[in-house]
Image (cartoon, rainbow, N blue to C red):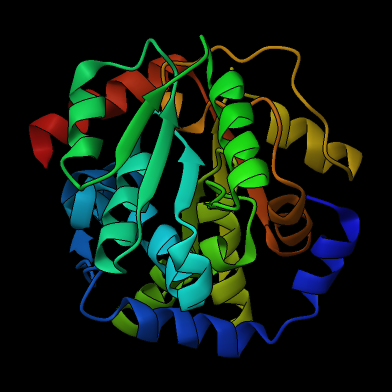
């Protein structure tokens, strides 16, 4: 994202934009419940609550940002069609949101994308184009379609409307748990983390927001330490949803201001916690 676009986004009325996102999402995204985790509470000595966005429409929080972005577009823009690149949850979120708004969606996916993910995206009415060996090549093709055919590109995370959509999670946390003291969010590209942090710090700044990253995905750790976006040389983690080489420019600007702490977890931590969640939740 260009620096002038970042600065323009930072000057917007965050409270109003977050409330608008919540209003747009009514009747589309679920207000997911907060559930207690006795096993994690016992392990940590603190009351731990979970917000299971895997129960969200399309199975992921990504519908929030995708729908808010697409709902912000004019009828004229929608008529040009929607395009994005993704091999996962963002693809399905955009496909679903475009269908709900009556727009044609084209999703560019790497050729190695598992057929299950391709079929799930097509099931929401999107056209899927398999192109490129890796995500970056698919993203380049999606941007080319946007440039040459006038289609509206919906970024997966580095976009103000997208992150405000994800930020409705923060609004729901504040509504459902008014005495919350700490909120922990995973950091990939930063759309979820920046959105939640923006919501929390806008409406209840005393609440601490803590980011969590795998040790094999150090881009956020390096960037926050340097005070600027720093791309990682390599990423090695089984947590593919947060495996990014470079944070977003806007998401970095927001988290650099609002993030209170950052914790790093090992691959062993991740694998053990997956098993624990399957057994206990």
Q: Is residue 277 visible?
A: yes
Q: Residue at x 59, y 87 (%)?
A: 15
Going 58% across and 39% down the picture, which residue do you hit? 145
Nearer to us in this view, 38 or 209: 209
Question: Where residue 4 sits in the image (x, y, percent)?
Answer: 89, 63
190 on left or right of 98: right
Left or right of residue 231, residue 109 in this image: left
In the image, 131 versus 87, the foreground residue is 131
Q: Position of residue 227 (x, y in %)?
A: 89, 45
Q: Residue 103, relative to residue 93: is it above or below? A: below
Residue drawn where x is 55% and y is 62% of the image = 163
The answer to whether 224 appears left or right of 125 in the picture is right
**Taking 28 as reference, is 186 above or below it?**
above
Quadrant into which the C terminus falls: top left
Question: Where residue 182 sits in the image (x, y, percent)?
Answer: 49, 64
Please give the name of the residue rendered at 48% of the width and 71% of the height, measured from the top-left corner.
Answer: 181
Residue 179 visible in image:
no
Q: In this view, does 20 lie above or below 130?
A: below
Left or right? Give the position of 95 relative to 70.
Answer: left
């Amino acid at each position: 994202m260009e620096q002038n676009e970042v600065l323009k986004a930072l000057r917007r009325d965050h409270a109003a934009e977050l409330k608008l996102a919540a209003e747009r999402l009514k009747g589309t995204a679920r207000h997911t419940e907060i559930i207690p985790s006795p096993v994690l509470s016992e392990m940590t000595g603190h009351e731990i609550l979970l917000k299971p966005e895997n129960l969200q429409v399309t199975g992921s929080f990504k519908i929030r940002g995708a729908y808010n972005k697409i709902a912000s577009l004019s009828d004229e823009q929608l008529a040009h069609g929607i395009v994005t690149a993704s091999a996962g949850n963002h693809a399905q979120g955009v496909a679903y949101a475009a269908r709900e708004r009556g727009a044609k969606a084209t999703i560019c996916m790497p050729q190695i994308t598992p057929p299950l993910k391709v079929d799930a995206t097509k099931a929401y009415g999107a056209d899927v184009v398999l192109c490129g060996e890796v995500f970056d090549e698919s993203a380049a093709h999606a941007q080319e379609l946007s440039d040459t055919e006038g289609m509206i590109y919906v970024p997966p995370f580095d976009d103000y409307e997208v992150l405000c959509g994800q930020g409705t999670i923060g609004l729901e946390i504040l509504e459902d748990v008014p005495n919350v003291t700490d909120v922990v969010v995973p950091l990939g590209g930063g759309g979820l983390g920046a959105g939640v942090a923006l919501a929390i710090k806008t409406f209840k700044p005393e609440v601490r927001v803590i980011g969590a990253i795998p040790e094999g995905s150090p881009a956020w750790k390096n960037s926050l330490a340097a005070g600027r976006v720093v791309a990682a040389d390599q990423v090695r983690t089984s947590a593919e949803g947060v495996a990014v080489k470079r944070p977003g420019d806007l998401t970095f600007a927001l988290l650099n201001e609002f993030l209170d702490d950052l914790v790093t977890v090992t691959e062993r931590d991740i694998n053990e916690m997956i098993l624990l969640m399957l057994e206990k939740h």
